[in-house]
Image (spheres, rainbow, N blue to C red):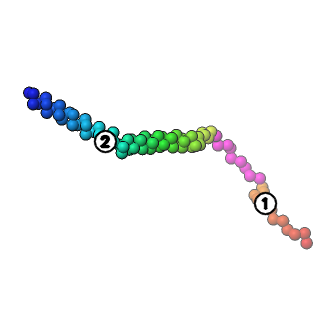
Amino acid sequence: MKKLHCALALLLVTSILCSGCSMLTTQGRQERAYSRYVKKSSAGRVKQQKRMRPKKTAIPESEPSEPMIASGVSGPESVSSGE
């Protein structure tokens, strides 16, 4: 029983030391700082894109009007010279 407690304590201590070591090194701190920087900048970029995106305005639907009857003139007439 005492050996079991000793083995578990040793396992616990080594797991804490091994997992915590990488966070305390210079490279670990730099990696965490960089990941925070990337997260912050990407969130800011998304926020800025949402502000710059034009809002869609709803186009009111109008009912079709009655068909119009065209007059006798269908288009522009040609102009002849005054000779």
Check residue 59 for magenta coloring: no
Q: Which callout, 1 or 2, points to the residue nearer the camera?
A: 2
The residue that mark 2 highlights is 22
Label 1 sits on a secondary structure element that is loop
What secondary structure is the stretch in magenta mostly built from?
loop
- The residue under the point 78% across, 60% down is 76
Indicate the position of residue 42 as horizontal and vertical percent values. Answer: 47, 43
The answer to whether residue 76 is above or below residue 6 is: below
Q: Mark 1 is on which residue type?
A: Pro
Number of disc labels: 2
Quadrant of the image occupied by residue 26: top left
Comparing 33 with 61, the one in front is 33
Q: Mark 2 is on which residue type?
A: Ser
Count neighbours of disc 1 (C-alpha within 10 A) and say few if under 14, some if 14 to 19, many if 20 or more.
few
User: Is 80 on the left-hand or right-hand side of 6?
Assistant: right
Q: Is residue 59 visible?
A: yes
Quarter that holds the N terminus: top left
Q: In the image, which disc is placed on residue 33? A: none
Indicate the position of residue 77 as horizontal and vertical percent values. Answer: 80, 62
Label 2 sits on a secondary structure element that is helix
Q: Which residues are magenta?
A: 61-71
Quarter that holds the C terminus: bottom right
